[in-house]
Image (tube, rainbow, N blue to C red):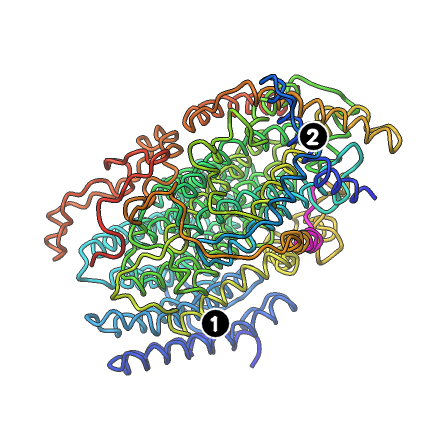
Amino acid sequence: MTGIDLLVAALVALLIGTLLTAVTAHSRTLCGYVAFAAMFAATLFVVQLAFEVLLGGPIVADEPLFTVPYFHAKLKFQVNELSIIFMLITVVLGSCATLFSIRYMLVYTQYRLARYYPILLLFFASILALLATKNMLLFLGLWEIMALTSWLLVAFETEDPEASQSALIYFIVSHVATGLMIFALMIIYPYTEPHSFELADLREGLRSMIETQPGLVGLAVALFVTAAATKAGILPFGFWLPHAHPVAPSPFSAVLSGCMVKMGVYRCLLVFMQLLPISSFSVVSGTIVAVLGTISIVVGTLTAMRQSDSKRLLAFSTIGQMGYIWLAIGVGVAFMPTNPYISVLALTASLFHTINHAGFKSLLFLNAGAALYRTGTRDMEKAGGLIQIMPITGATAIIGALSISGVPGFSGFTSKWLIVESSIVGGWHMPLMVFLGLIAIFVSAATLATLIKFIGGIFLGRLQVGPEVERREVPPTMVIAQVVLALFCIIFGLLPMYAIRYMYTAVAGSLPPDFATPSFSTMFGESMFNMTLGTEAAPSTGAWDPIVILLVFAGFVLLAVLIARLGGGARRTVPVWLCGEHHEFAEYRYPSHSFMRPFTRLVEWMYPPIGLKPLAVPRALLIRLGIEPLPESPPRDGGGGPVSDADATPEPSREPAGVSE
Amino acid sequence: MTAVINIAMALLVAPLFGGWIRKYIRARFHSRQGPPVLQPFYDIFKLLGKEDLRSTPSAILDFGPPAVLAAMLTAALLTPMGHPAPLGEYGDLIVFVHMITIAVVATILVGLATPSPFAAVGSAREIMMHLVVEPTLIIALVTVAVKARSVMLGDMADHVLMFGWTPSIVISILALLASLQAQMGKLPFDIAEADQEVMGGPFVEISGPPLALFHWAQFAKQMVYTSLLVAIFFPWGAEQPFPINLLIHLLKVFAVFVISGLIDVLSPRIRIEQAMFYFVIVIAMAIAGLGLAVAGY
């Protein structure tokens, strides 16, 4: 089997899996394994396809699968380097998430799993199909299947009113976004010649409109970008994200954050690289995209810092990380007409951060899910020290946290480095960009603070769990899923060049043929192990050699360990030192809502104007839909509650340590 | 060769400059005689021979302290010290800044790995200080990078050497000097360690050899930071042949350490929210400098 047949085979595997899981759903374990088998088969097919596409170039199907008669819309699969990268993200995350689900979903004894696995597999099938479609009409249809299936999965816990309400918000928002996309297509459609929804025809239509109807072009691009930003969780449109992501079952939260929001990125890249002809519109819209991205970086991360619900923290941090990707896309698009070098650099960076974020954010959601599986709570106040009973989960969580905070040697660093370098280099021509880049570096430190709160709250410190919690690692299937994702974090951190080369190929292959793409070796240097950024004129403006720097670092760690052994002092276990007094742990515990309180108070002024309030769904509508309205509760992002400054004197916890219920 | 010099500066010279100068100045202000020159090494060696007391079994406590020292030594290899940085071709200013971040992360993780409330408070303060101090450093360095049109530390030093100071660079220098004490972990900004309040903060549960590594890393950090400051913003003398440029560099670093020691002795410790308010102003100043640089001044 070769070429497009592999994609069809993957789709067929997923659809057969959908049927089989629906049939076997009465056996809760079996249908999990069936789902994983289907997903894994699809993964193998897509990986083989990826080899063909990345080494041999894009593949187009000979015959359309079917045709929509009136619109002449042909479903003709084609896979290029850009879509195969998103397909790889989808199947790898899909496999890890389904593997994780097998044991995780057994917790939900009150729900039928026929409402989970078949829909999950259908969701992945729709994503794979939409990535291979260049016809916007069918793209919309598949997009809609993706939206509906993901909505059903977000609403999985029907007995939880919060989940139902969040799912409703998500449903409304994602359909408004789809509406915007339809509207944008309707604007362009009359100008296409012949009338069609093929991407290439729409592009020609837009090209003819730029001269005659610039206002309409601007409107269409704005609608497309708004729709993509809504999916990607970019503020101010992505407010649904922190509601929908935490309430979904944890493996699906991982898929939402790792895979589905990336479809917004794909959508945005598609609009700017293949739909909108390079023109002055690129500069304006690129700048706007970069600014929106930076707003998301700041607001998302700083809001994440204040959460005490582990999955909500991760969801807000997703907004922040998507902001990085959009900042890079914005820089890339803004420089398309003037400076191909910066443009390709930034687009490559955005794509690389996309796959890195898919890896580490899904990993962190799975870690949070594993902690939830063991302790039954998402509240970081009630967990702690879990690394002592779940060493592998804890270790992978630390790897994920180091990756997302951009610590050298882990995956997030290289992509953030590229994003920052491209904005600084861009700043030489467009001063705004250098400030956006600086904000990105600053927030990278804030991300670190946020994730330290996450792992500090859940995994480090003193073990505090109730007697009913089993004191052992989560089951092997869940461990494997986490370890696989952690390995990706490390591999992309140590050997980024192999990945970057394919990202570069994807960007270069998707840009229009007349685009003056600089060669790979000019941009990133000759070697496959280090990066020397530069142009023909200035061959070396930045450098990062992970192997040399990290080997040196490792050598120094060894040296330091040896120095510490020199004296030959013994090791002894002692109780925690509390200035000679005796206290119960509950009396001196440092509560997670007090963590970094002086800093969050310092940036307090930023919150009111941008406060992410939940969308107020009218009570009448909720009651009509049979959803129990949530009681009036204090703001959940920790802003309004009575929080004391526990910096100097840790406030004694009011409740006994450990999980109370 | 240059690598050996840089490591020697960070491991051997730094304790003298960072430890002894401060202790000596403090003693003179108290009308005491002051410790012998090698006192910092006596302290380190004594700690290396002591017992390692642990309150929590955790691998983080095994690898955290060595990682902090290793990160600072790697950063030392990325720093020009009168001569070009030995690893300057392998990492630029962003990499340099993130090597310092590794040290901060490792310190904080060590603090949080123990159940001690003092360590938790100290770690939280450490990261908050990092959040406000790091931007100053980055903005000041990026200001020069914008002027030099390169993110490599070597190119930036060359640019200042050739074209001298411009208003934007002067402002970055002021911002860096304003954050000097915080970067050195000295008064009035030793808020995270604050011996009298939180018993050394993240280090409260650390004893013996790991504590020696932490102290050593702190000295190395002071040397790295001071070296970077003088190598990029006061590069004159770097064009001289080998032993002279190193001597000039040492003299400049010595001067900075003396100034820093004086401030340390004469200052009280301020509270964390005061410090953050102060750094907001410093950051605003640095951003103004960057604005000037972007505008071409």
Q: Which residue is mark 2?
A: B36
Q: Amino acid at mark 2?
A: Pro
Q: Position of residue A365 (x, y in %)?
A: 39, 58
B184 or A227, nearer to the observer: B184
Chain containing mark 2: B
Q: Nearer the viewer, residue B114 or B32?
A: B32
Query: Which image quarter holds the C terminus of chain A?
Result: bottom left
Is residue A204 highlighted in magenta?
Answer: no
Query: Residue at coordinates 52% horizontally, 56% vertically from top-left?
Result: A356
Residue A276 sits above or below residue B272 on the image: below
Quarter of the view holding residue B169: top right
User: Which range of residues does the magenta coloring cover?
Assistant: A541-555
Q: Is residue A549 magenta?
A: yes
Relative vertical location of residue A48 with respect to residue B167 in this rendering, above or below: below
Question: Label 1's element?
Answer: loop
User: Can residue A307 be seen in this snapshot?
Assistant: no
Callout 2 crowding tier (Cα within 10 Å): few <14, some 14–19, many ≥20: few
